Image: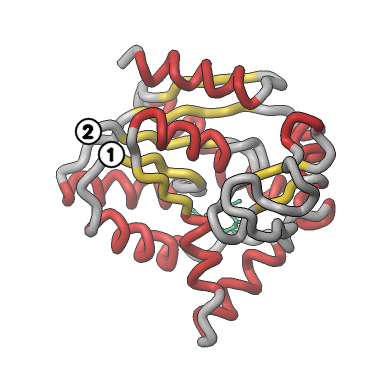
Amino acid sequence: MKNIILIAPPAAGKGTQSKLLSSEYNLTHISTGDLLRTASQKNDEMGSLIKGLIDSGSLVSDEIVINLLKDTLDNLNSGYILDGFPRTVNQAEKYLDMLEELNIPLGDVIFIDIPKDVIKKRIIGRLVCPNCGAVYNNLIEENKPLKEGICNECSSELIKRKDDNEETFDKRYDTYVKETYPLVEFFKDKGVLSTISGNLSKEETFDMLKQIIGNK
Ligand code: AMP
């Protein structure tokens, strides 16, 4: 069973690469951002708490995220790719305990290292499909949808995520540096981290990921 964790700054293309990898290796794509966005649409106290945190660029509490993830893993019988989790060292520690309990191997941990100025440009033009999750960018020629504002895959109307603006991005990036970047050392110390770095295209990044994953 192949399991993959992708660590990267916000808007580095984790979602896009996860989708490509999940079809290449037949893996379930688990995005904690998507799980939380779904939970935030519920008309209850928990839903509005989660929505407020996401919209402001803050992290949701470890406990909420871990419970959502545990429910998902409990019902899964295939390999998976984790997109957006763990986001803190505490989440990583709890996750390792969870794997031991469920008897699931850790698998590959891959760090996609992209400079801040590059991703900031990418985020301003990002559009997502609320129906199938496909991601586009109306400022990058090769990532534009074929028909303006419409998903190539399912013809739904594309939306801009509320947290995809400059101010929220800066906050999310600071949170990443403080909370998530320490995971690089955490997994390096365990001898399980591979790194891809540079301003690479979607295709180049995917090729590098396949080289790492395919070699194991
Ligand atoms: P993403 O779609 O991965 O960019 O996540 C969007 C937002 O969901 C983040 O800015 C956080 O507010 C929240 N989120 C996603 N994953 C996590 C996580 N593992 N821990 C805490 N908050 C998370």
| Neighbour tally class for label 2: few under 14, some 14-19, many 20 plus, Cα within 10 Å | few
User: To which quarter of the image does residue 96 belong?
Assistant: top left
Residue in view at x 29 percent, y 35 percent: 106
Which label was assigned to residue 8? none
In this rendering, the count of numbered labels is: 2
Tell which circle, 1 or 2, labels the residue nearer the N-terminal end. Answer: 2
Whether residue 9 is visible here, answered yes or no, is: yes
Report helix, strand or loop for mark 2: loop
Query: Could you tell me which quadrant the N terminus lies in?
Result: top left
Please provide percent x and percent y for residue 36: 51, 64
Residue in view at x 24 percent, y 43 percent: 78
Report helix, strand or loop for mark 1: loop
User: To which quarter of the image does residue 162 belong?
Assistant: bottom right
Please provide percent x and percent y for residue 93: 35, 46
**Is 165 above or below relative to 86?**
below
The residue type indicated by label 2 comes to Met
Please provide percent x and percent y for residue 207: 52, 17
> Do the numbered discs 1 and 2 sit on residues whose CB atoms are within 8 Å?
yes
Please provide percent x and percent y for residue 161: 71, 59
Which label was assigned to residue 79? 1
Residue tagged 2: 1
Query: Could you tell me which quadrant the C terminus lies in?
Result: top left
Whether residue 177 is visible here, answered yes or no, is: no
Left or right: 104 as drawn, with respect to 67: left
Foreground: 63 or 138?
138
Residue in view at x 59 percent, y 80 percent: 48
**Is 122 above or below relative to 133?**
above
The residue type indicated by label 1 comes to Gly
